[in-house]
Image (cartoon, helix red, strand yellow):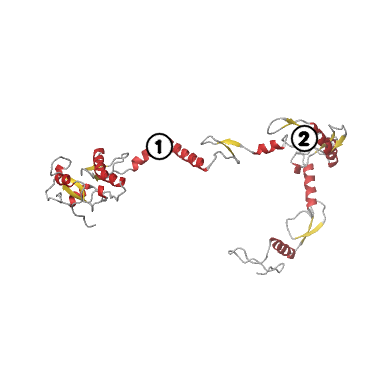
Amino acid sequence: MICSVCGKEFERIGKTGPLPTVCSPECRGKRDYEKRDKLPKERLICAYCEKPFETNRKKQRFCSDECRFEWRKDKDRKNPLAKIKICEVCGKEFPPVKLAGGRQRFCSEDCSRLFYAKKKKGICIVCGREYSGRSDNKGFCSRECAVKIKGLMVKKCAFCSSGFKGKGNYCSDECKVNSRIKYRVCVVCGKEFYAAGGQLICSGECSKQHARNKQRERYIENRENIIAKREKEFVPKRVVCKECGTEFQTEYGKPRKVFCSDECARKNHKRTGKAVRRARKKGLGCEVFDPLDVFKRDAWTCQLCGVKTPKKLRGTCNDKAPELDHVIPLALGGEHSMRNTQCLCRKCNRDKGATARGQLRIA
């Protein structure tokens, strides 16, 4: 695209709206001034100096900004309601200009210059010479006098609080270096450490522990609300006990989800865990299973003599009581698995001992 004012090529920035004809705000201002100059001009008379002037604006009353400003000053002076003030230098009465916001103190610029010239004058504290300078001077005629009195003054060190004479805030370079080193006590472990900035924790481990402590505190504060919320959201389930087969309902806050009571859980873990522990001790292969599954597989029948071993005799000293036996005993390196186990009566299991008798199941 080409600019209609300067003739330069430019790219469009926005994708919406009408196509631009100028490349920059400066060219747009030039274009607007040119359009205004082309408009027909009218001949008007200034309301203050009464001189004729030409303009494109129909409502324009003054030929320049100076005439407009002077006309406003005269209007404020002629206003009878304006408060009359007294000049602080010459003591004359004068009506304040409305543009000054009613804060005018002097009748003219000469009086204001005289007032501030007197105010700036003073006597130097060091050499006793009269001087005129800025209003923020602190009693010194020059920089040399200020340096002299500062050299005589006794300062306190910002680190060790000892008195010294000279420049700066520290009595020595050691105090300057030590002031930058900040030692703090860790909030978590209580050890002293070098802190960079506003650090309160000495290491990453302490920061993790600090976060855990904060989380625990928040939990303790809102524990009752959390427990009440979880109790409302908890949905009880009907479950069959894995040990005794009775149906029971789960309760909130109790970890039992498979067994109806602690006795059933203890029986099950005792039955299934004894052989597993023995196999793991010897470093043999082990499989977690329920011995009742083996008895069901073998139809509650002794695999050597074929005698029926009823379930009601389990755990008794009867010769027909069912017992779990390893085909290849654990003492000879056999594994604890359903493939290597079988159902035997108490008499056959006693006679077999630690010998390999029976048949392995097909996996």
Q: Amino acid at mark 2?
A: Gly
Residue at position x 78%, y 52% from top? 65
Q: Which residue is mark 2?
A: 166
Task: Please report whichever mark, 2 or 1, sits nearer to the chain's N-terminal start.
Answer: 2
Left or right: 264 in relation to 221: left
- The foreground one among 128 and 10 is 128
Where residue 261 appears, x then y in whole percent? 25, 39
Work out which quarter of the rendered image holds the N terminus and state it.
bottom right
Is 50 situated above or below 263?
Answer: below
- The foreground one among 130 and 359 is 359
Residue 164, picture quadrant: top right
Left or right: 324 in relation to 11: left
- The foreground one among 262 and 91 is 262
Label drawn at residue 223: 1
Label drawn at residue 143: none
Q: Amino acid at mark 1?
A: Arg
Left or right: 286 in relation to 26: left
